[in-house]
Image (tube, grey):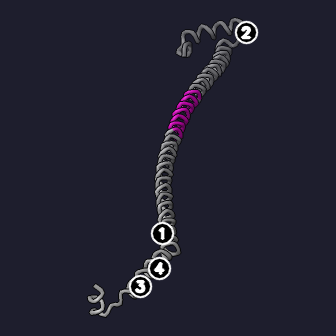
Amino acid sequence: MGDAFSALGVSVPLLLAQIVNFAVLLIILRFTLYKPVLRMLDDRKQRIAEGLNAAEIARREAASAQANIQAQLEAARKEGQEIVANAQAIANRIEAESREQAAREREAALEKARNEIQLERDRAIAELRREFAAITVAAAEKVINQSLDQQAHQRIIEETLAESRFSGN
């Protein structure tokens, strides 16, 4: 076998020395370079996994926060709508109360005006009666050229007014 290697130009002792050197080099590299590189790659892999986990947690928290914000916005929107509805109901109630108050005031003013008209009418009728009585007395004095006493005069006026159209009106 040595001849076959020598025919190929390979020296067996040199080949064995290179194999031993290569094995020693592999052992040295394994402890000095391979394990630290693997440890570094494992650390990096772990940091990447932690980063991905943190990103996933952050995404979930963001989604949860977004859902909370949406819920709060919806609650605020509903509350705003309720406030507007309540304000509108209050405005409608105030408007209705104002209309009712205005109607009551208008009715009271109308009743007051009717009462004042009635009082003025009664005063005018009383004044007309007095004037009528004075005119009647003056005419009667002229006709009979004598003065009637006050009681007889009042009785005649009352009888005349009772028979006239001024009696009830």
Q: Which residue is mark 3?
A: 18
Local crowd size for mark 1, using a 10 Å CA cut-off: few (<14), some (14–19), many (≥20): few
Dot 2 falls on a residue whose secondary structure is helix
Question: Image quarter for residue 13?
Answer: bottom left
- Residue 141 x, y percent position in the rendering: 68, 14
* Foreground of the two, 72 or 92: 72
Which one is nearer the viewer's eye here, 1 or 133? Answer: 1
User: Does 161 appear above or below 47?
Assistant: above
The alpha-carbon separation of the residues under discs 1 and 4 comes to: 18 Å
Q: Cβ–Cβ below 8 Å for labels 1 and 3?
A: no
The local secondary structure at tag 4 comes to helix
- The residue that mark 1 highlights is 38
**Which of pointers 1 and 4 indicates the residue nearer the eye?**
4
- Which residue is identified by label 2? 150
Callout 3 amino acid: Gln
Label 4 sits on residue = 25
Q: Nearer the viewer, residue 28 or 116?
A: 28
Give the foreground label among 2 and 4.
4
Whole-percent x, y for residue 93 in the image:
53, 34
